[in-house]
Image (cartoon, rainbow, N blue to C red):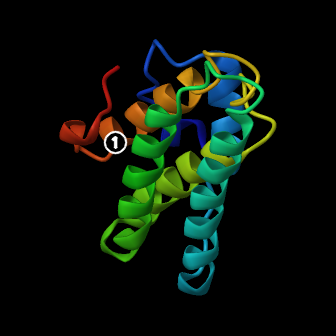
Amino acid sequence: MTDSFFSNVDPGLDPNAYRLFSALCTTITPDETPELQAQVLAHVTHIRDQLRTNEFLDIDLAERLADKLVQLLQGLAAYSQEDQRLIVGAARYFVSDDDAEPDTQSILGLDDDLAVFNYVVTQLGQPDLRIEV
């Protein structure tokens, strides 16, 4: 992936989150899309399960992110190859246990996922999909 692919990085996007996210932006086949959708939904279930030990996790934000990521993945074929990689990267970042701020470790665990998601939908030209907290 070239640096120009990420030429419009949101200044609010943490450099570590950006580095991790950009490595996850790859092409997937149509057969792999349902599995990634399932991973997104399973991650929300995992966060919900973790509420037993950390009541401060933002399950509402996790569910909002998952809903919009699944929506984007369901329409993946309608996007350009470049945009598809961004969507896949955002979904993989969301489900990753090794992102900039682990999702179940603190109340801020989903902040980096939110920043990545909002960056992606802005790049897609769909700022109306941004999630504001």
SS type, badge 1? helix
Image side of residue 49 versus residue 18, left or right: right
Taking the image as drawn, is residue 1 in sight? no
Image side of residue 116 versus residue 36, left or right: left
Residue 99 drawn at (x, y percent)? 74, 32
Determine the residue positioned at 32% across, 31% down. Answer: 131
Q: Residues within 10 Å of mark 1 (few under 14, many from 20)?
A: many
Mark 1: amino acid: Val
Q: Which residue is more in the foreground, 125 or 117?
A: 117
- In which quarter of the view is residue 105 placed? top right
* 11 w.r.t. 51: above or below: above
- In which quarter of the view is residue 14 placed? top right
* Farthest residue, direction bottom: 31
Residue 130 drawn at (x, y percent)? 29, 34
* Farthest residue, direction left: 128
Quarter of the image that includes the C terminus = top left
Residue under label 1:
121
Determine the residue positioned at 22% across, 36% down. Answer: 127
* 45 w.r.t. 133: above or below: below
Q: Which residue is more in the foreground, 104 or 121?
A: 104
Image side of residue 13 versus residue 38, left or right: left
* 41 w.r.t. 13: above or below: below
- In which quarter of the view is residue 83 placed? bottom left
Residue 34 drawn at (x, y percent)? 56, 77
Residue 68 drawn at (x, y percent)? 37, 51
How many numbered marks appear? 1
Taking the image as drawn, is residue 52 in sight? yes
